[in-house]
Image (cartoon, rainbow, N blue to C red):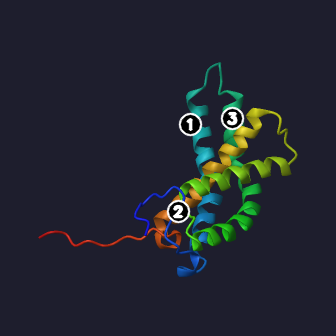
Amino acid sequence: MITSRFPIARTNPGGFAKASFWPGATGALAVLVIVPLFGFLIQAVAMAFYTTPPLVPDAFMGLTALLIASPLLSWAALLVAIPISALLAKNGYAGWGIAAVMGAIAGFVALVLIGGPVARADDTTAFVDVGVFMAMIYWGMIRMMHPAAIGVEFKATKPKS
């Protein structure tokens, strides 16, 4: 039995079967809503503070634009990622490290699918970083709302009187 509350790779075999489709729906909703809002928020804060030249660096603006536009590609990645994450959870591989690797792969595949320049390290890094960030949001939301779905069991303890 795995006792870590934030397992890197191995978890107790559980899976989404215990909670039907809600873990995947919760994680997907978080990715599709929270990530663009976060991108918009940090872009707005940066533009408020950088009012005189030099303005907000182009690389930062590009990264926040990627976060804001992420739902354009992430819905397709979620169609593949949700069943894979359910299968991994069922077999006891639902840790945050596994989610980060899956997010990095999804970010790289998204870059390849849109025809981005893979040879440019900054573009590749940005897409992989956003993929990992989105995977951590997905995993974290499931971890908070449906911990039994990824094999993290909590035992209630009585307070000492």
Determine the residue positioned at 67% across, 27% down: 57
Quarter holding the C terminus is bottom left
Badge 3: residue crowd in 10 Å (few <14, some 14–19, many ≥20): some
Badge 1: residue crowd in 10 Å (few <14, some 14–19, many ≥20): few
Quarter holding the N terminus is bottom left
The mark found on residue 66 in the picture is none
The mark found on residue 45 in the picture is 1
Distance from disc 3 to disc 1, alpha carbons, whole Å, reads 11 Å
Q: Quadrant of residue 24?
A: bottom right
Front residue of 64/20: it is 20
Looking at the image, tell me whether mark 2 or mark 3 is earlier in sequence order. Answer: 2
Which residue is denoted by mark 2 in the rendering?
A: 10
Q: Label 3 sits on what residue type? A: Met
Q: Label 1 sits on what residue type? A: Val
Q: Is residue 5 above or below residue 46?
A: below
Looking at the image, tell me whether mark 1 or mark 2 is earlier in sequence order. Answer: 2
Q: Single out the mark in the foreground, 3 or 1.
A: 3
Determine the residue positioned at 50% across, 66% down: 11
Q: Position of residue 45 (x, y in %)?
A: 56, 36
Asked whether the beta carbons under mark 2 and mark 3 sit within 8 Å of each other, the answer is no
Q: Label 2 sits on what residue type? A: Arg
Look at the numbered disc 3 and give the secondary structure of its residue.
Answer: helix
Q: Single out the mark in the foreground, 1 or 2.
A: 2
Q: Is residue 43 above or below residue 153?
A: above
Looking at the image, tell me whether mark 3 or mark 1 is earlier in sequence order. Answer: 1
The mark found on residue 61 in the picture is 3
